[in-house]
Image (cartoon, rainbow, N blue to C red):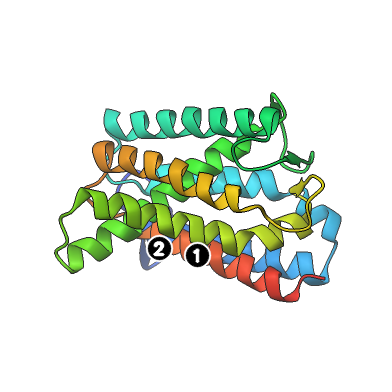
Amino acid sequence: MAIELTGRRVLAGPIFVSKQQLAGIITVLVYAIGTSGLLFGDFNFFIRSTPFVLVLNFLLIVWTEKSLKVNFFIFLFASFIISMLAEIIGIRTGSVFGTYAYSNLLGIKLMEVPVIIGINWLVLIYGVGNVISLVFRKFKVRSSIALIAGGAFVTTFFDWIMEPAATRLGYWHWVNQTFVPVSNYISWFLLSAILISLYKKHVEGSINYFAIFLLIIQAIFFITLRIFLP
């Protein structure tokens, strides 16, 4: 069996698989195993594997990106810096998202914020940006404001899906609060709008279908855990 990763397609025996298809297969396997492990297996082992999965997501996004130009990396860098700054200010002051704290499950921290959080922000924004771009292209919507607002709404809705599962998993917890504060969703919308505008300026063009697929798989993952995780 020969595998060649230099081109757009990968040869695995007699079967040709595109980069995006191979990335999709890897993602399904990783999230299927992870979901099963968290629900029925060794919870502590699988929960501590989270940072490695999030790094894998990022690497697959970069690998499947068709146009690895300077603007793409400007978007990645700027999204990481802006989201990390927002998270650090939020953790330190409690005035952005609300009063919350991260556990040690997500790996190395910078000023109390796991570095992987900044990476996860840019992966999420990139996925949402591709979704909104695809939908707007299909329906021939050309409004930049609508694209940014739509992207911010989808990202905030994703957070609403994610929050109950993420807190049960122990990724973070809200301090002296029994529910997610409204300020969290307002700040998510505003920060997402800024990051989606960066996506539009630096990246929007060809669609990365793997990024859309990854976003869907992540949504299914959190919905499943939201329903079934004790």
Quarter-wise, where is residue 12 in the image? bottom left
Q: Residue at x 65, y 45 (%)?
A: 52
Assess whether mark 2 and mark 1 are in contact (beta carbons under 8 angstroms). Answer: yes
Tell me the quarter of the image containing the C terminus.
bottom right
Residue 122 shows in the view: yes
Which amino acid is tagged 1? Ile
Q: Residues within 10 Å of mark 1 (few under 14, many from 20)?
A: few
Judging by the rendered image, the residue that carries numbered circle 2 is 21
How many numbered circles are shown? 2
Is 33 situated above or below 75? below
Left or right: where 27 falls relative to 150: right
Measured in 3D between alpha carbons, the distance from the residue under mark 1 to the one under mark 2, in whole angstroms, is 6 Å
Residue 12 shows in the view: no
Q: Residue at x 41, y 34 (%)?
A: 76
Task: Locate residue 130, reporting x and y percent.
Answer: 33, 55
Is 121 situated above or below 185? above
Task: Locate residue 98, reporting x and y percent.
Answer: 66, 42
Left or right: where 50 falls relative to 6: right
Is 112 situated above or below 211? above
Q: Residue at x 23, y 51 (%)?
A: 206
Judging by the rendered image, the residue that carries numbered circle 1 is 25
Is 70 situated above or below 214? above
Task: Locate residue 30, reporting x and y percent.
Answer: 62, 60
Which residue reaches farthest bottom? Answer: 228
